[in-house]
Amino acid sequence: MEYSRQAELVALQIAHLKKTGGAPALRLLKLSQSAVTFVITHKLRVCEAQLVGRSYNHTVDWGAALYHQFVRGGDESYLAEYLAVLTLTPEVTLDVVKKLEHEGITRERRARVAVLLTHVEESDTVYRVASQLGLKGSIDTCLASPAAPYLRDTVFVQGCTYGQ
């Protein structure tokens, strides 16, 4: 199994070399753990990140990857690729929001989080994040949805404290 993962990694490295047409290519072989984290979160597409993560036995931080490539970088195709192969969980969503708050909220980033929330199935997570970030459209959508009675019974009673 180890050799097949290494072969996949070498094939991906060759593909990146061919893509650049002689210019310096993204290095994927013999990376440190911090370099693996960086290329996964900042440089690679979703399927490539999965492959590199497997090859290095490295857990992919999808919250960081989505934050850097979609929320911060504005790459809508990255979100589409992510949603095609993975589910957007409350944990990943909250991790994205934590990174957003740490780096600073801009109008563009807030709008991208609103787009992200349209793909989260858990209405309580959507409502809490939308309330926290002041995303009125997302809040209104939650309150107009069939989940509104549930939200009234749970989130409204508990409040919208981050991290719950």
Image: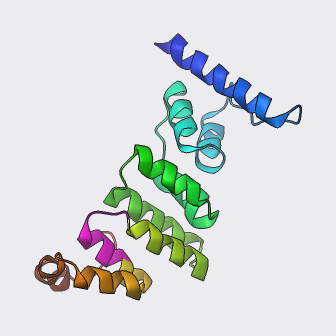
Looking at the magenta stretch, what is its main secondary structure?
helix
Q: Position of residue 68 (x, y in %)?
A: 59, 58
Q: Position of residue 76 (x, y in %)?
A: 57, 60
Q: Is residue 146 above or below residue 7?
A: below
Queried whether the magenta region covers residue 144, the answer comes back as: no
**33 or 127, which is in the foreground?**
127
Q: Position of residue 141 (x, y in %)?
A: 31, 81
Placement of the C terminus among the 4 image quadrants: bottom left
Whether residue 76 sits left or right of residue 31 in the image: it is left
Q: Farthest residue in the right direction?
A: 22
Q: Is residue 83 above or below residue 37?
A: below
**46 or 29, which is in the foreground?**
46
Q: Position of residue 49 (x, y in %)?
A: 55, 39
Asked whether residue 64 is in view, the answer is: no
Whether residue 152 sits left or right of residue 108 in the image: it is left
Queried whether the magenta region covers residue 123, the answer comes back as: yes
| Residue at left offset 53%, top offset 43% | 46
Whether residue 36 sits left or right of residue 156 in the image: it is right
**103 or 79, which is in the foreground?**
79
Q: How many marks?
A: 0
| Residue at left offset 51%, top offset 56% | 79
Range covered by the magenta-colored residues: 119-129
The color scheme shown is rainbow
| Residue at left offset 33%, top offset 56% | 89
| Residue at left offset 39%, top offset 88% | 136
Asked whether residue 155 is in view, the answer is: yes
**1 or 84, which is in the foreground?**
84
